Image (spheres, coloured by chain):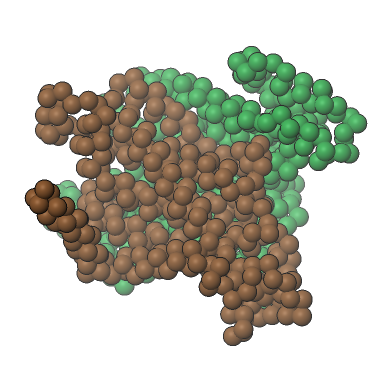
Amino acid sequence: MRTYVIRRILALIPTLLFASMIVFVTIRMIPGDVIDLMLSQNDVSADKLSRERLIQALGLDRSMPEQYFRWIWGILHGDFGRSLWQSTPVLEQVLQRLPVTLELGLMALLIGLSIALPIGIYSAVRQDTFGDMLARSFSILMLAVPSFWLGTMVMVFPSIWWGWSPEVNYVNLTEDPLQNLKQMIVPAIVLGAALSAVTMRMTRTMMLEVLRQDYIRTAWAKGLPERLIVMRHALRNALIPVVTLVGLQAPLLIGGAVIIEQIFVIPGMGLLLLDAVGQRDYPVVTGVFLVVGLSVMLINLVVDLSYGLLDPRVRRQ
Amino acid sequence: MSATSEALPTVASASHGAIVCFVVRLFQEKPFGAIAGLVFLLFVVCGSFANVLAPYGFNEINLIERLQPPTWQHPFGTDNLGRDLLSRCLYGAKLSVIIGLSAAGLATVISVSIGMLTGYLGGRVDMIGQRLVDAYMSFPELVILIAVVSVLGPGMLQIIGVLSLVFGIAGSRIIRSAVLSVRENMYVHAAQSIGCSTGRILWRHILPNIMPPIIVLFTTRVGAVILVESGLSFLGLGVPPPTPTWGGLLSGSGRSYMFQGPWLALAPGLCLTVVVFATNVFGDALRDLLDPRMRGSK
């Protein structure tokens, strides 16, 4: 198990390197005239930021490899650069927003799982019944409903019908936990709905596969009650691929969070990214981009390692 | 001479017959999938002929008829400038068809190229390729798109390019695993032993045998691309106005009028959901029929 962990962490290094290159190259596609665009768009601070200073701040006056190494060197020292307009360190801004997005993502995950698992299990155990059909139609429908439409409808229709609309004045979790949770629950449900559809399908498929195994027949033959067979014998094996799948949904959760944060005005990483894009604040865009990629990689690593904990067969290899 | 001219039609009719046969099977075994396929076809037709089908222009302002609920004259209602929502949705479909089909097509080409090369060549190429794919896949499509659009500015070509690149790289995994299973077949070894070039083996022996996953990949990508594109438009980073997009219709200035005219929030989202739903169901049906090994997977 220890060699497995070490191998997985070592395998992360080339991936990280490639990821940093992707981020670097993507942002460095800036054509020269964008500098002028930045200056003309933000004419308020034009006097504060001259063309030369901007080029210098972006490091565009150096050669590509040099820019890359300076950038990487900075990141390794915890220096993600400074925001062009607020001149606060990018890392500080990102770290301030990260917990908000994490909270939203975690709540969405919990909600998604608590919808998906019971329905997925039910759907598999009662295969091809009316309930199964209903659950499957629902899940494939939820895959198609865009979260921004769902979010928009949650904003519009309750307000027209009952005069109720979700709170949009964000309160910090540490300030007023109850108010914060009340505020986050609706966005989290909208975000979790999309996740639940995929997970439900996967749970059902895996349960069906496991329920056909010989040891399940043995368990039936022993006269065990259905609840015990399903929960103790089948579910534990069926859940392993589901865990991987949930890990793979991390990009979907973070990507979805960008939209949800915009609709419900939640000051997380997504809103930071969108604001930065609006202001053409490239150091911030780069920082968020990189932190998002890093988070997804870490989540995938944790999922891979938990795979070993959940499945003794993986552990022994 | 006569032999070749006779042989040609038979080959053509054989593949023609195979397609007809497949469509019949689709309707018999997967009626829902077939209906979904028809809906998808309808969407493509609507999008392609939006100019002819739309009763009004997409930017035809009529302030007298502003914010009208759905009527016979305006089946989807009108917006705050009196523009007909049905026409705007149809023109939105046009954009979704263009972006959906071209980005999904390009993405499939990229997936197939990367997947075939890494899967067939194996070794170091495969290892480096896989790490790169890993790195790419740890960024949500939307975040990559936002970052690129922030640099290049919004526009259809940028969006198609980035969408096809992102989805193409992610999809290469599926093609790679299909190639891995085909690669060890006897006829591939035979081709290798008589000295066929790598290019010829890939083109003549591998590619025809991984067609089913390729078709399925393309179909499912169309829905995914449309969904991500509309998300980008919703954030105001898609194809810039006045061109209507389904995502754009749900955002921007229209949002404040939705409380007075809730139909503004309904029609574009409904179009989007129905099309993506139909594409998913159709893709699932194709997968079940074409590739039994992939049945039930995501």
Q: In this view, does A46 lie to the left or right of A156?
A: right
Q: What tint does the image give chain A?
A: green
Q: What tint does the image give chain B?
A: brown
Residue at screen point 39% across, 28% down: B130
The residue furthest right is: A47
Q: Is residue A181 visible?
A: no
Q: Residue A67, located in which quarter of the rendered image?
A: top right
The residue furthest left is: B3
Q: In this view, does B102 lie above or below B188?
A: below
Counting from the top left corner in percent of width and height, residue B205 is at 20, 36
Q: Is residue A166 above or below residue A285?
A: below
Q: Is residue A277 above or below residue A262?
A: above
Residue at screen point 68% across, 57% down: B241
Counting from the top left corner in percent of width and height, residue A130 is at 31, 72
Q: In this view, does B101 lie to the left or right of B35?
A: right
Counting from the top left corner in percent of width and height, residue A32 is at 71, 29
Residue at screen point 43% across, 32% down: B133
Along the line of sight, which residue is nearer the eye, A168 or A59? A59
